[in-house]
Image (cartoon, rainbow, N blue to C red):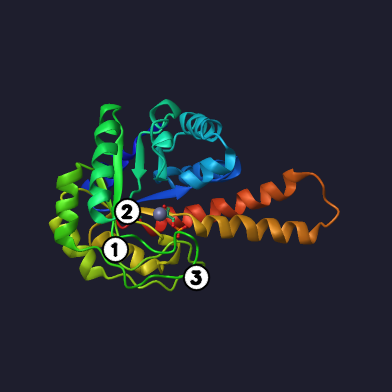
Amino acid sequence: MLTTTSALVSAARAAGTGVAALNVITLEHAEAVVLAAERTGLPAIVQISQNAARHHGDVAPLAAAVGALARASGARLALHFDHVEDTALLHRAAECGAGSVMFDASRLSDEDNVKATRAAAEWAHGQGLYVEAELGAIGGKKGSAHTPGVRTDPREAREFVEATGVDALAVAVGSSHAMKDRTARLDLGLVARIAAEVPVPLVLHGSSGVPAAQLRDAVRHGMTKINFGTLLSVAFTDAVRASLAASPEEHDPRPWLAEGRAAVVEAAAWCLRAVDAA
Ligand code: G3H
Ligand code: ZN
């Protein structure tokens, strides 16, 4: 069923557990996430990033596919637009069936981040959308270096939420985007301090680089929405590479797309279970 990020995050918070948010790029990724949710019996937030939307040129076809897959499934699934910097994409969220958007102005100064995020949240709330924003840039957005030193200050986080009216907050607590190994070290004490200070649910980005035990600990210390992307892409591409290497004469894309999709089902199921701390 197609539900909303708001409903899934609220339910997870009430149950003291986390909910995984999984980035999809192709139809096969989306099919795999839905299959993983069905297989595990756990809910999933299906995310389309601004980068993925740009890859397709128009976000609407992939968003429509996610919506169709979700409506046909017994699993609880939500559609979310992720890392939206472009207001033109923000403005397409509701018509494309997304119930939530992460508006990412974290590249701006904190003052400009507040202004831009408040304006985006006011507009989005008028459309009935649930809004996530980020304070304290989480590193590695260009897939480069880790930035382990970046941290969100708990008091500034509370002030940011009060000033912008956002519904969920992504914070920098030691993870970094696009890590291919699980070597991040989360500052769990900071997670607890931010959770005690900030009234809205917290979001962990760059979760592919976080060891399984720390993901569960992060949830227990107050994280609710846990975002994964790179781990799924690595699983997909490794499986496709192996399939093509094993069958170099193959020209039908279906066998290797199927191998990639099967690998993403396994990886996505791992993510869904990893944040299920109940
Ligand atoms: O917003 C998406 C997530 O932060 C994904 O991060 O690709 O490092 O897992 P990741
Ligand atoms: Zn992210």
**CA–CA distance between discs 2 and 1?**
27 Å
SS at mark 2 in the image: loop
| Residue 216 position in % (x across, y down) | 33, 63
| Image-based side of 246 in relation to 109, left or right | right
Number of residues whose C-alpha sits closer than 10 Å to that of mark 1, classed few (under 14), some (14–19) or many (20 or more): many
| Tag of residue 232 | none
| Tag of residue 181 | 3
SS at mark 1 in the image: helix
Tell me which image quadrant ligand 1 sits in: bottom left
| Image-based side of 244 in relation to 129, left or right | right
Does the beta carbon of the residue at mark 1 sit less than 8 Å from ligand 1?
no
Q: State the residue at coordinates (14%, 52%).
A: 159
Does the beta carbon of the residue at mark 2 sit less than 8 Å from ligand 2?
no
| Residue 43 position in % (x across, y down) | 39, 44
Amino acid type, label 3: Asp
| Image-based side of 137 in relation to 95, left or right | left
| Residue 172 position in % (x across, y down) | 30, 62
**CA–CA distance between discs 1 and 3?**
18 Å
> Which residue in the protein does label 2 denote?
108
Q: Is the C-beta separation of discs 2 and 1 under 8 Å?
A: no
- Earlier along the polypeptide chain: callout 2 or callout 1? 2
The mark lying in front, picked from 2 and 3, is 2
Q: State the residue at coordinates (44%, 63%).
A: 140
Amino acid type, label 2: Leu
Looking at this view, is 6 or 17 the one in front? Answer: 6
| Residue 192 position in % (x across, y down) | 19, 64
| Tag of residue 218 | 1
Q: State the residue at coordinates (60%, 43%).
A: 28
Residue sticking out furthest to the right:
249
Please state, as top left, top right, bottom left or bottom right, where the C terminus lies in the image. bottom left
Task: Give the answer, above or below, for where 85 lies relative to 266.
Answer: above
**CA–CA distance between discs 2 and 3?**
29 Å
